[in-house]
Amino acid sequence: MEQTVIAVAVFLFTYALIISERVHRTVAALFGAAVVLFLKIVPWEAVPEHLDLDTIFLLIGMMIIVNTAKESGLFEFIAIKTAKFAKGSPMKVLLLFSVVTAVISSVLDNVTTVLLLTPMLLYITRLMEINPIPFLLSEVFSSNIGGAATLIGDPPNIMIGSAAGLSFNDFIFNMGPIAAVDLVVSLGLIYLLYRNVMRVNKAKRDRILSTIEGLNEEEAIRDYGLFKKSVTVIIGVVLLFFIHDRLGIEPAVVALTGASVLLMWSRKDPEGILERVEWTAIFFFIGLFIIVGSLVETGVIDVAARWILGYIDTTGEALVIIAWFSAIASAIVDNIPLTAAMIPLIKAMGSSMNVYPLWWALSLGACLGGNGTAIGASANVVVLGIAAREGVRITFMDFLRVGLIIMLTTVGIGLGLLWIRYIGV
Amino acid sequence: MDIFSRLIQRKFRNIAGERYEKIARRYREFLLLPEELVLPEINSILIPIDRFSGEIPSELYETLSAYSGASVTVVYVSEKRTLSLIEQTLGKEEAEKLRRAKMDFAGRLSREIASRLEKYGLRVETKHFLGSKSDDVIKLMENENFDLLILSRSYGSEVTRTSPVSPVVLKIVQHLERPVIIY
């Protein structure tokens, strides 16, 4: 009993620290993990059971690929190309940048995507001399929506895929259509909310066009050989993801294979590349897995699952509750710790009902709930942080006013589609 | 709402602060706004020199040829504090001897640079005086409204592998808002 109380206290304290960010979230997670290990709430022999190596190695593999590809100037190249395609039209900038962000986010991590595209977006809006806020918000929403579409798009999906044994194609089939519809709807909503500020006269558009045409995307490429190799490996890895289940290999193996092939082929200094792997994120996951493991070891998860099952009779009810609970919770807590806590809960519910649709409800809520508030997802924080550094102030309330509408609409639509598919009309 | 702004900034620093700095630097290399693409008009140039400055590279002379017609002031500043210290330790006579030697060297070096600059169509004036290598250059830039400052990275002191730019140069550039070329 004493151990149960300590495990719950450590869990709540760590999550409170993560929300407040008073200390670095990785430090908070590792500290919590150290406490439960020190007190033997999670026995040392049980640690490997709780560490989800599929998730950890998939993240490491993808980080190596992205960090190597980044060196070539690939993302700056994409940003300039996108800007040129938009031809100085605010609507086209909004549309193209949102679609490109969503597509890249579905393959690479959201933080890297927005880190590399936001400076370009701010540059274009400065040229257009129009309010950058709708463009930045649309980029955030598209990144979170795009990330929801695939197994590798967002860390919660990686965790869900690994825990439930879901393949890349399962995600494409279930979450892909939802993400596509939600992207169109969110763009429509942004347009409706900000259509008055998205106007540029002909003279200004010509001036913008001539400046953008003056940008040379070739100049952004720092290493042409690496550029070609990175594109080839990324395409190869995505293709392998499509057939990994047929080949009988785990997604983590695909990512690690891609990473090692790119390192071998590019002959890049592995020390430099491995140094840039976001080890803080990896250790954040390790800490969380151990903290959530302490709840599993002490039986807290089973008790919570039984309590929930006492109120839920059907898969349909569970679908609605999990989608909305995870969406609202992930607008407040980071979606990674939320997913880490929800996964064992859904697994425990598996003894009484078909939980297959519930994984999609969790993915939907965890990925799209992040759109609700400025602190709901890492991509939101990064875009707002960059904007603040570049003199564009987007307050918590500014974000909330639009974010909440987007979150409620996109989760609602996604839930509707899941309901039609798994429960029926 | 300030609490949330601080929270967002803390989270941003922890998630991507350093990574963003690197990306922003990289973008700044090729993303310039139209007003930043306009070359500043340069009519007057200040070139402080001393015994540490070394030779001006030929590429820099070629760069300066783009400002043909501009006036250049080559100024040699001897550190007053060094001469005062010598006067206190070795006496007035030694200090005076050193001052004369410095002025002779300053004159020779300034003339040499001036003649090369004049070949590129620049109007050159030379000055040498006792003062502070950093404060007097900052004052000259501010009071005489020079458009461009050209400095050797070893102006004021020798440089090392660990400090590739002299502290005097660092102090000067931190106090100026005008364009500076460091060679």
Image (cartoon, coloured by chain):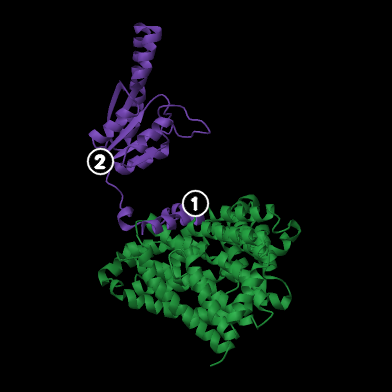
Chain colours: A green, B purple
Residue A421: horizontal and vertical position, in percent? 57, 88
Quadrant location of residue A232?
bottom right
Residue A226: horizontal and vertical position, in percent? 59, 59
Residue at position x 27%, y 43% from top?
B42
In which quadrant is the N terminus of chain B drawn?
bottom left
Quadrant location of residue A253?
bottom right
Question: On the rendered structure, is A128 left or right of A386?
Answer: left
Q: Identify which amino acid the numbered label 2 is placed on.
A: Asn
On residue B43, the disc is 2
Furthest residue in direction bottom, as rendered: A425
Residue A159: horizontal and vertical position, in percent? 62, 69
Q: Could one spot residue A217 in this view of the protein?
A: no
Residue at position x 24%, y 37% from top?
B145
What chain does badge 2 belong to?
B
Q: Which residue is mark 1?
A: B18
Q: Identify which amino acid the numbered label 1 is placed on.
A: Glu
Category of crowding for the residue at label 1, using alpha-carbon neighbours closer than 10 angstroms: few (below 14), some (14–19), many (at least 20): few
Q: SS at mark 2?
A: loop
Chain-order first, disc 2 or disc 1: 1
Q: SS at mark 1?
A: helix
Residue at position x 60%, y 73% from top?
A151
What chain does badge 1 belong to?
B
Question: On the rendered structure, is B153 left or right of A152?
Answer: left
Q: Which of A72 and A370 lies nearest the eye of the viewer?
A: A370
